[in-house]
Image (spheres, rainbow, N blue to C red):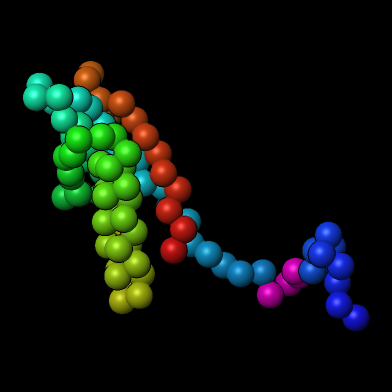
Amino acid sequence: MKPKSHEKLPVTGDTVPQVPVFSCVIYIRKTEDGKVAGRVANFAGLSSSGFSERDVLSRLSKEFKAQVINLHQEGKPIPLIEPPQPPEPDENVRSIPVHL
């Protein structure tokens, strides 16, 4: 019997998918020349700059996801910095959930 479009299929037991989710914490700020700079606070070595906050957040979250996927596939530990260093006074905090 085919379920109606408004009915949900039951998902139980071991059939529930296990999708890893990581929080990408980004500190973002305006630079003196009017650009936007960002850095991932909970994963070392990821930073970017651009003309808009959206561009910087997109670039950094994609790079974060790529790095985490590679490490996860290789079975290596994910070197998340917990807790991250606090933001500088001119930085704003953004948190992006990243699903693998």
| Residue 12 in magenta stretch | yes
95 vs 14, left or right, is: left
In the picture as drawn, the residue positioned furthest to the top comes out as 89
Residue 84 in which image quadrant: top left
Q: Residue at x 16, y 50 (%)?
A: 45
In what quadrant of the picture does the N terminus appear? bottom right
Across the whole image, how many numbered discs are drawn on residues? Answer: 0
Residue with the most extreme left position: 33
Left or right for 88, reference 57:
left
Asked whether 34 or 8 is in front, the reply is: 34
Q: Residue at x 41, y 44 (%)?
A: 96
Q: Quadrant of residue 37?
A: top left
Q: Position of residue 58 (x, y in %)?
A: 32, 47
Please tell me whether residue 14 belongs to the stretch shown in magenta. Answer: yes
Residue 18 placement (x, y as % from top left): 57, 67
Say left or right for 86 vs 15.
Answer: left
